[in-house]
Image (tube, coloured by chain):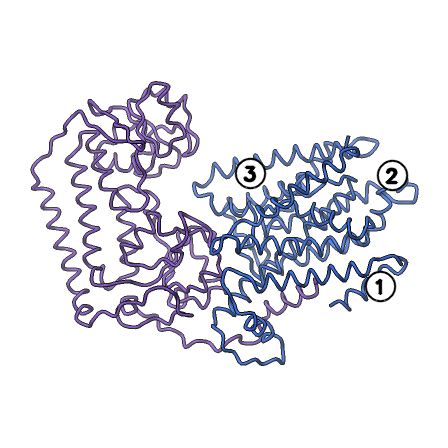
Amino acid sequence: MLFITLVMIALGCTNSKEPQKPLPSEPASAPIETISTTKPPILPAPAAPALPAPTATIRADIPGKSSATNKRLFSKHIERAKEQPKLFAEFPVSIPDRYGKEIIFDEAPERIIAFDSAAIETLFAIGEGHRVIGTHDYVIYPPEASDVMRVGDAFNMDIEAVLNLEPDLVYLFYPTYKDQLEDAGLKVLLIETIEDDFKKMADHFRMWGAITGAVNNSESIAEDFEARVEIIETALAPFESGPSVFQDVGSFWTPGNDTLVGNVFEVLKLVNIASEVKGYAQISPEVIVERNPQYIISSYGDIFSTDPAFAEVLAIKNRAVFVPNEDYLSVSGPRFILGVEEMAKLIYPGIFK
Amino acid sequence: MQQDIDNKSEKAYVVNLSFPWIRTAFCLLAAFICCILAALIGSVTIAPDAAIAITFTRLPFIEIKNDWPVSWNIILWELRYPRIALAMLVGAALSVSGATYQGLFRNPLADPYLIGVASGAALGATIVFLSGIPSVIAGISILPIAAFIGGIGAVTAAYTLARRSTGTPLTTLILAGVAIGSFTTAVASILMLRSDPDLRPILSWLMGGFIRAQWSQSLYLLPYLILGFTVVFTYSRILNAMQLEEEYASSVGVNVEKTKKILILTATVITAAAVSFSGLIGFVGLVAPHTARLIWGSDFRNLIPMSALLGGCFLVLSDLVARTIVSPGELPVGIITSLVGAPFFIYLLVKNRSNIQ
């Protein structure tokens, strides 16, 4: 048995014989051509829906129009935000929590412990960062938040430190410490997590505006967010379905369609090759090779391009393995849209400039 | 292959007339079948005839007209076969070191994990992982070296703690090993928690698995395994003598303390090499040697090679289950080996209750 293993290793390492007639190497085509005209040679034909073949008019139309539309939409939006009649903060504010209970705020909380990266980013973005007195170790943005006191890492809260800070609101993103904190007499807010629709983030921004009274700032951030999503959706509306994609978040862990990133893929008309994965899961590399994604987003460094196992995957042959600059998509806060836009630009450089 | 091993065995066991040939042949056949199964089954279904053709087309002088998708060739030769090879070698490594520790400490429950070696090795590898040192320097993979330093550190600490002027009491060594193992695991956990918010990759490495198996890893592992196996096999007669009483072994001219040191060092090298390429995979070093003992008896000259064979097969089969049971997803193979191994451990515990007390 060891003998056979040795022979196999020897054969595998030497690779003496050319295994297959090599495919004619794909031209490093601009992705926009892939989506609009040529049907990429997916081997063997997957169950994925055929790529659309939009008419030449649409293709000629989109790139020119969209960048202009982009600018126009943005500037119009910004003007609109400036001209907007002032909203007025109204108290009391009632926020439904995850369990359907209404949490009432008679006035804006002055001392907030936000045990959640997204909440911290939102609070600072709407100019209410001064209310934040505590958070967890893994919060890395914005830089101003680095002075905020840490009351535990994301999964272990130092309850004594929390009580000692005397907060008038503790915002959590998972329920572990909720009862304990409430028993200690603190006001705790734990809302429904966004799992399937990243557009709901705008409501979170508005919620923080309502709680803190910064309704105008939060409204303008929410509207900016919605407008930018709309630009992307409008530009991609003529297309039925785009290229296939695989995202690796380390050791072949990948998001399924029921995650926020899966939802981003959906909005970007990308076909997630790991569509049946529930939440995040580790996927077999055999499946990646078989389903042959046209794009690979490798969140923590490119482990694919140097691995012989993936040499024949379209994304590697077309040099379409992307390592995002910053991990915007891991925090569902105001910077999330930057991650969506970054991905849109990477995959449709002809449409989004 | 049968021929090859038979020849080798005949030389080694020329005095051993009672060697159970039929059982051995049966096990070799079973091992062969489990490799075939592992090659044919996967999360991507490949037609068996194509798989056979793809396999044999790499052999010299065989030309087969290929009409299969290019991805199948890659899936077999770059993903599935390197995985089987690495699982086979790691399984063999863990079993040989497990059998060695069991013989050395005359404790049926000794396993690379029980005496702290694997946890120490994992700590060494974790430090390399987290410190950002490139894992290959000048063509030499430093992971096994770091793992070896960690493993030998752990076993030295345990050995020093347990050592008395009269020798090394075995129960004390096991207890010291468990304590050291818990300590190194705790240190590794602290390092992980304090370094990087994204722990998924290192956690899944620690849990053990072959998802990133490559041919090069088998190549790196092979020299350690061959060297270690040779040393342990050479000492198998002395291991037999040591099973009776250390005094007896001394009286027939065995330098017991020196032998212990050499064997501990060797078994640690093998464990460290295996851990650095596969992470922590428990219970292989327990299941395989005991199964081998049930089939071939407790003569270490049979036990060592047969443990290697069974351990390899056990891990190949466990990995087959791990990569297909939640297809297209994967489970860490350590979960599967623990599911099988933990009940086995309890069985041994109950069976040996009188010996241990």
Question: Chain for mark 1?
Answer: B
Q: Secondary structure at mark 2?
A: loop
Instruction: Give amino acid for label 1.
Output: Glu
> Which residue is drawn at the image coordinates 52% and 35% (left, top)?
B190
Q: Is residue B38 left or right of residue B164?
A: left
How many residues crowd mark 3 within 10 Å: few (<14), some (14–19), many (20+)? Answer: many
Query: Which chain: purple?
Result: A
Q: CA distance from mark 2 to mark 1?
A: 29 Å
User: Which color is chain B depicted in?
Assistant: blue
- Callout 1 touching callout 3 (CB < 8 Å): no
> Which residue is drawn at the image coordinates 44% and 43% (left, top)?
B198
Residue to which mark 3 is pinned:
B188
| Residue A104 spot, x, y in % from top left | 23, 25
Residue to which mark 1 is pinned:
B10
Q: Are marks 1 and 3 on the same chain?
A: yes
Residue to which mark 2 is pinned:
B245
Residue A33 in which image quadrant? bottom left
